[in-house]
């Protein structure tokens, strides 16, 4: 509503040939940008809606956003048949991927981060591999807020998280959760 009101005001100012027209246009642009940012923020609070798009679509959008924002390669790979029935598990997997990407960029200075999703041996597997600096020699898997958060999220959904160095350079973070393909029976 505010954007429409400011746009209308700008048109009135323009019709009268007033110099404040440029200011009204700037305000309109800023309001529209704020609206876009608010929508992005709201989408980030609950990024995975299984009924609509699923975890794969959310991860695809996440990696595309990372490429755009950080100007690095961030491909997403997944066969189309992978589905996670439990929305809570999907949200936690998404957040684990998000944290692993953040760590790769922030701590590892990675220029490429690959995210994948697959179903293997009765589990949904989410590996995030990067070409960053790798793990420090004194790496402690229990240290670091990001690692604790990933482990906590994994524990909530009965998953495991492993963090290991890649040969040469980089890190591999893998989260695996039991695959619950069928909807639980409803008790009457």
Image (cartoon, helix red, strand yellow):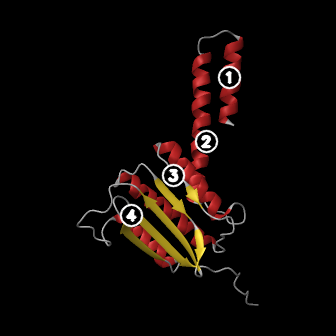
Instruction: Mark 2 vs mark 4: give the one in front.
Output: 4
Q: Earlier in the sequence, mark 4 or mark 3?
A: 3
The CA span between labels 2 and 4 is 28 Å
Pointers 3 and 2 in contact (CB under 8 A)? no
The CA span between labels 2 and 1 is 21 Å
Q: Earlier in the sequence, mark 2 or mark 1?
A: 1
Give the residue pinned by disc 3: 74
Q: Is residue 55 above or below residue 19?
A: below
Local crowd at mark 3 within 10 Å, few (<14), some, or many (≥20)?
Answer: many
Which image quadrant for residue 21? top right
Give the residue pinned by disc 1: 9
Q: Is residue 96 visible?
A: no
Residue at coordinates 41% horizontally, 68% vertically from top-left?
Answer: 149
Q: Is residue 67 left or right of residue 49?
A: left
Which quarter of the rendered picture does the N terminus lie within?
A: top right
Measuring from the top left, give residue 130's x and y in whole percent: 42, 57
Q: Secondary structure at mark 3?
A: loop
């Amino acid at each position: 509503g505010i954007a429409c009101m400011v746009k209308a005001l700008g048109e009135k100012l323009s019709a009268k040939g007033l110099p404040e027209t440029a200011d009204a246009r700037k305000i309109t642009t800023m309001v529209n940008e704020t609206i876009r940012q608010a929508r992005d923020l709201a989408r980030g609070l609950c990024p995975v809606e299984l009924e609509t798009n699923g975890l794969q679509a959310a991860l695809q959008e996440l990696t595309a956003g990372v490429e755009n924002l950080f100007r690095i390669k961030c491909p997403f790979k997944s066969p189309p048949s992978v589905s996670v029935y439990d929305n809570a598990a999907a949200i936690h997997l998404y957040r684990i991927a998000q944290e692993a990407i953040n760590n790769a960029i922030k701590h590892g200075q990675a220029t490429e981060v690959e995210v994948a999703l697959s179903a293997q041996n009765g589990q949904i597997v989410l590996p995030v591999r990067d070409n960053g600096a790798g793990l420090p020699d004194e790496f402690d898997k229990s240290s670091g807020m990001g690692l604790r958060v990933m482990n906590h999220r994994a524990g909530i959904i009965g998953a495991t998280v492993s963090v290991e160095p890649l040969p040469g350079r980089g890190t591999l973070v893998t989260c695996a959760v039991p695959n619950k393909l069928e909807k639980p029976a409803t008790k009457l």
